[in-house]
Image (spheres, rainbow, N blue to C red):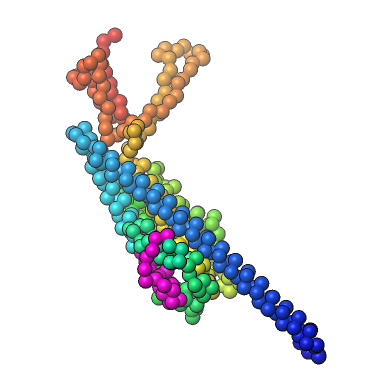
Amino acid sequence: MAGGKETPRQKMIGMMYLVLTALLALNVSKSILDAFVAIEENIQKANIVQVDRGDLFYGNVKEEIQAAKGPDNVAKKKKLEYVLGQMDKIDKETVTMIEFIDKLKLEILNMAQENTSTYKDKDHTNILWKKSDKVKPARMWLAAVQGMDKYDEPMQVLGIAEDIKNPTGNGAELWKRLNDYRSKIVEIAGTYQMPGSDKKFTITPKAINAYENNTALTKAVNAMVDGSKANLKEDRQVLIDLYIGLTKLEKNEVHDMEGVHWIGMTFDHSPLVAGIAALSSLQQDVLSARALAMAHYKSKVSTGEYSFNKIVPLAYGPVVANGGDDIELKIMMAAFDSDNQPKVTVNGYEGGDNITYPGNGQGVVKIKA
């Protein structure tokens, strides 16, 4: 279409071709932006599910405390109250992280001159629907954003407008807070001393942000956890899962450029709606870790209709057997509540010298044959 003489008709066809190409490009761009809006909406809904999961575990423990009444439940109540205190620590760290990420979202929207003056729930003409509520992130509707394709604003807010290898300002702060949250949640989940127990478990996580692949990361995290003074018998896998779930590779190769920071890789020339979706996804990582840590602590106390927190193996066989005889052993497991020793009653009689309690949920009755 360049060079040589063209008839008016040819010029018109060429111009129409350019316009058509531009329109097609705009349509593709809009479809991609709409996809980011849909993805972000699904992430927000998933975040609410993770919040509810964590809240359920917290609520179960709180209800169990209210139900633990009387002298027989003193030890159990202390244990439940201790666990609730650990859950409160988890929530405190989570609230701080969620609110900081919400603040970054609002800064991006404000810099793009979007309307963030009011909250109107389920109003599809308004971006902000609900304010953040403790660990629950602010509810947004990105379909109402006018400048969906703006990419300068996320880069400026996240401090990578000048250098995607070395984020500054909010970007550097976000990276620090993410790593601090990872360390704190793992520490809270693995450092404790249950009431009535003389065993104290501790773990002080170190930063693992450089690794060749996921296999190498898993190996490094396993070694870190195994080298700690944590309760490896009960907590090992949970601590590993918590750490890995919150870990991002710090330096990356992007389009043959090495050393690109995770912040730079994630938000470099990212459209506004994609940048906010990435922040919502990060909130999902945080809330998933919170739910896992809550579930872990809930498992340390008995909640529910059938109350138990310990299991012992049992094997029964014949009282007398001759050498070479085939015998049968009955193998089973018994579940019991270590904080609430069951009482044994024999023909309506409870207690006395003929009934003792050695522990493990057992009662021993001495009778004459």
Q: Position of residue 113 (x, y in %)?
A: 43, 77
Q: Would you place residue 208 above or below residue 153 in this image?
A: above
Which residues are the magenta region? 98-122
Residue 116 on the magenta span: yes
**Residue visible at 52% across and 64% down in the picture:** 37
In-image side of 101 versus 12 (left or right):
left
Q: Is residue 300 visible?
A: yes
Q: Position of residue 309 (x, y in %)?
A: 34, 36
Furthest residue toward front: 9
Residue 60 occupies which quadrant of the picture? top left
**Residue visible at 36% across and 68% down in the picture:** 118
The front one of 210 and 126 is: 126
Q: Quadrant of the C terminus?
A: top left
The front one of 105 and 325 is: 105
Q: Quadrant of the N terminus?
A: bottom right
Q: Would you place residue 271 above or below residue 316 in this image?
A: below
Residue 129 on the magenta span: no
Q: Position of residue 63 (x, y in %)?
A: 28, 41
